[in-house]
Amino acid sequence: MGQPINVVFTRSSKPEIYRFEVNRCLTGMDHERFQIDDEIIGDTPSDELARRLFSIGGVVGIHLNSNMITVKSDGSELSTEELIETISDLHLFYGNGFEDVSGDEKVDSDT
């Protein structure tokens, strides 16, 4: 449920910087910055995205402005595929592993 976010990765001249452009505005016109040691207590989309990106490991800083996301690594190589998937899935309520645990049977509409 929800819609995936379209993500475009752009290389930086600095190998520890990863830049992404998305088709959603995440912060309005504000800049939001997060560091690895910050306590993220909010519940905005950018707060949730920062928590998810930091959980990947190797991420030490995140800067968001409107539809631009900049991720700074600790110097280690990050998986761009994992970063893109994490960003893309921000507004999805259920991932690919969603399983209906309600016990309801699926009914074919032709019957």
Image: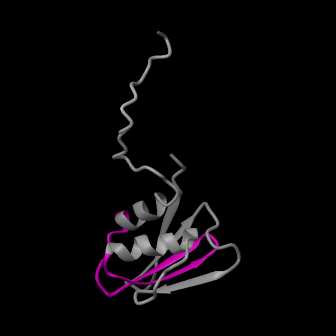
The colour mode here is one colour
Q: Position of residue 54 (x, y in %)?
A: 39, 77
Residue that extends furthest to the top in the rendered view of this protein: 111
Determine the residue positioned at 46% across, 57% down: 89
Residue that extends furthest to the front in the rendered view of this protein: 103
In the displayed structure, would residue 24 be above or below residue 4?
below
Q: Is residue 96 left or right of residue 111?
A: left
Residue that extends furthest to the left in the rendered view of this protein: 76
Q: Where is residue 62 in the image (x, y as percent from the top left)?
A: 48, 81
Determine the residue positioned at 47% across, 64% down: 87
In the displayed structure, would residue 89 be above or below residue 61?
above
| Magenta part of the chain | 57-81
Determine the residue positioned at 54% across, 49% down: 2
In the displayed structure, would residue 107 be above or below residue 16?
above
Q: How many labels does the image show?
A: 0
Given residues 88 and 44, the one toward you in this image is: 44
Q: Is residue 2 magenta-colored? A: no
Given residues 84 and 106, the one toward you in this image is: 106
Determine the residue positioned at 40% across, 29% down: 104
Q: Is residue 76 magenta-colored? A: yes
Q: Where is residue 96 in the image (x, y as percent from the top left)?
A: 37, 46
